Image (spheres, grey):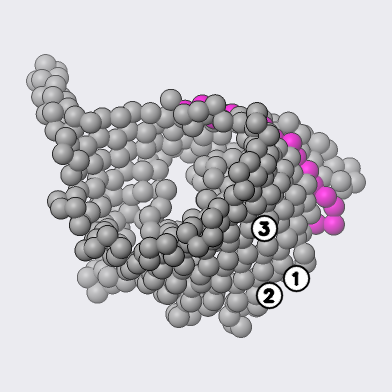
Amino acid sequence: MKKIFAISLVFALVASAAFAQVAVGGSVETRWIMLEGDTADDSEVGTGGSIHAGVIHMSGGSDDGTIRGVLQLTAANDEHAGPTINGAWGQTGYNLWFERAFITWRPIDQLELFLGHDGNGKFEPSGLLRWGYHQMPRGISQEAWDAHHYLVANWEGFGWAATIRPIDAFTLNFAMNLPNQGLRSYEDAFDPILVQAGYNIDNVGNITFTYRGPGAGNYWNFGNQSRLGLIFNSNSLVEGLDFVIGGSFGFEEDVDLDDPLWIALGFHYTGGDWGIKNRNFIRIRGMEVDTNDSQMRFDIMPWYNLGFAVAYFDIRVQMGYAGDELQWHFNPYLRKDFGGGSQLRFGGYVGNTISGNPADDLNFALVSTVIVSF
């Protein structure tokens, strides 16, 4: 026992010397579903809640900043901590997993190497269409992550990656998934790769071209399809306006996930204490799919700073996600920031979607959530 203690002590001393810049933090989120129900006959209005998520985050690096390690342990009532409103996820119980566990090494300023897993994702240039729309990691907003609306990238698998910046305006990203258990034959080793090139034009915007091989990235989108994507982002052409436009094309057939063409457009205009966000998706599906051949979605969200909190008014209309019927929701909410990542949020929901399917009756909910970061 003394020997083990001595070895552990030596390891701790060496680690503390090698990684002098150590940071530890975390957050806890609690949620109260004050009421939830629908207008169907004989339906009941219920209430519930959860410790929605708890996170412990640790990071450290060498004094010169060339090597860095990140470890994040997350416990949540659902792996992706999506909203429980209206059974959109409806998970019960808690999962505990390493959401982030990786090491980066920057031997020179123009090169960064990555090995591990980053559950926050890498290399997705259309953030305004996804997480950047609501800008809440785990919120009361309906479908805050929008996980199935990647255009092409968001690499979050376990594997290695390299970022090369030969000049300030040009970036090359390479990534390859690795099996975290067992081995993959070299015959298939380079199938799940991601190759991305981005070029920034001063006072205009950034153009990103991405190739994503079958199975590259994560478990969410596109299955074994290979995809090509082209995305343009700009926050320089018009004062106060951020916008993104892009699309992706799948050129290998997959009957179960036959999504040959995605097109998307989004913008965020800020006029001081107010603003408006919008995003639009068109998904042209292959004819081999037995269901509908296309999907369309329109989101618009005005917001206003009331001084004590920011009010958001999220509206969505979509077709093709569950047959040909129109789906819609109205999701207003307030967000009060206390600084340091701590927030109080309160909001409501009304719509015609229950468990992802359109319904003849309306469903509704009132939800509050608190996040404290430390």
- Name the element at disc 3: strand
Q: Which residue is mark 1?
A: 324
Q: Which mark is residue 299?
A: 3
* Image side of residue 99 versus residue 307, left or right: left
**Which callout, 1 or 3, points at the residue further toward the start of the chain?**
3
- Name the element at disc 1: loop
Using the image, determine if residue 280 lies above or below residue 225: above
In magenta stretch: residue 20 = no
Disc 1 residue type (three-letter): Asp
Identify the image quadrant of the C terminus: top left
Q: Give the Cα separation between the discs numbered 3 and 2.
A: 21 Å
Disc 2 residue type (three-letter): Asn
Q: Is there CB contact under 8 Å for labels 3 and 2? A: no
In magenta stretch: residue 366 = yes
Residue 61: % across, % down: 22, 37
* Region rendered in magenta: 359-373
Using the image, determine if residue 226 lies above or below residue 143: below
**Which callout, 3 or 2, points at the residue further toward the start of the chain?**
2
How many residues crowd around disc 3 within 10 Å: few (fewer than 14), some, or many (20 or more)? Answer: some
Q: Is there CB contact under 8 Å for labels 1 and 2? A: yes
